[in-house]
Image (cartoon, helix red, strand yellow):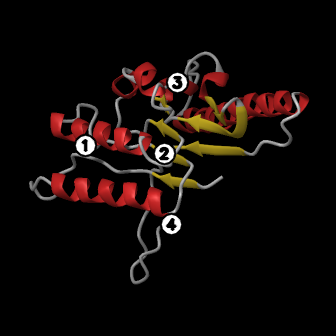
Amino acid sequence: MNILHTSDWHIGRSLYGRKRYEEFSAFLDWLVQTIEDERIDALLVAGDVFDTSTPSNRAQELYYRFLCRVAASCCRHVVVIAGNHDSPTFLNAPKELLRALHVHVVGSITDDAEDEVIMLQTDDTPEAIVCAVPYLRDKDIRTVDPGDTIDDKNLKLLDGLKQHYADVYAAAEEKRDACKRAGHGDIPIVVMGHLFTAGGKTVDGDGVRE
């Protein structure tokens, strides 16, 4: 199975006040061509599809036109998760409709970790299991107690992140075990997520971020 991973398109972002829709359109054209050239079976889009939570009509048009083109290509599966720039509710709104095109969207977490586990299959034959973890916001994963210090809050945030990924992976393992029992062999698990790192800095001279 050929998988192509991409993220952080930021469709609609301006550069010094200049609109860049032609650039975004050219990139998406190139991506469709790459999918065809490389015979990609599954496309994974790991967040920040748009640059803002309220993308323009032009940005939305580019996004949905791209998904339609991919659905008509050799690519059999698309999985999209929300990033910190995306609106979870906006991405989720058409998810049932997009599922008809074999596009799976996970904009936000739910009470059930299994909702972030996507089974990619063709003709009822499982091919891969994707842990599709969207950007996790503080309110989604962190508990706050009276008297907590900043350090306490940060540690609870890290613990919440770790626990959520562990819960989703455990749900994926259960699906894989069920596939084994059904005689489908060892199905690969792919984990994708979107994280925002604070406090990074660029080291002068080599462009390396710490």
Determine whether 207 is above or below 35 in the image: below
- Residue depicted at x 81% and y 28%: 174
Q: Distance between the residues labelled 2 and 3?
A: 18 Å
Q: Earlier in the sequence, mark 2 or mark 1?
A: 2
Q: Is mark 1 on a helix, strand or loop?
A: helix
Give the foreground label among 1 and 3.
1
Q: Is label 1 or label 4 in front?
A: 1
Q: Which of marks 4 and 2 is nearer the N terminus?
A: 2
Q: In the image, what residue type sits under mark 1?
A: Leu
The residue indicated by pointer 1 is 62
Among the two numbered marks 1 and 4 on one chain, the one whose residue lies closer to the N terminus: 1
Q: Which sits in the foreground, 176 or 81? A: 176
Judged from this view, the residue extending furthest toward the bottom is 205
Q: Which residue lies furthest to the left in this view?
A: 17
Label 3 is placed on what type of residue? Asp
Residue located beneath label 2 in the image: 46
- What residue is disc 4 on? 210
Eye-nearest disc, 2 or 1: 1
Q: How far apart are marks 2 and 1 (CA)?
A: 17 Å
How far apart in space, not on screen, are marks 1 and 3 (Cα)?
30 Å
Amino acid type indicated by mark 2 = Ala
Per the image, label 4 sits on a secondary structure element best described as loop
> Seen in the image, is 72 located left or right of residue 164?
left
What number is the disc on residue 194?
none
Which image quadrant is residue 149 in?
top right
Closer to the camera in the image, 93 or 194: 93
Q: Which residue is drawn at 67% across and 23% down?
A: 114
**Residue at point 45% right, 57% down?**
36
Ranked by sequence position, the earlier of labels 3 and 4 is 3
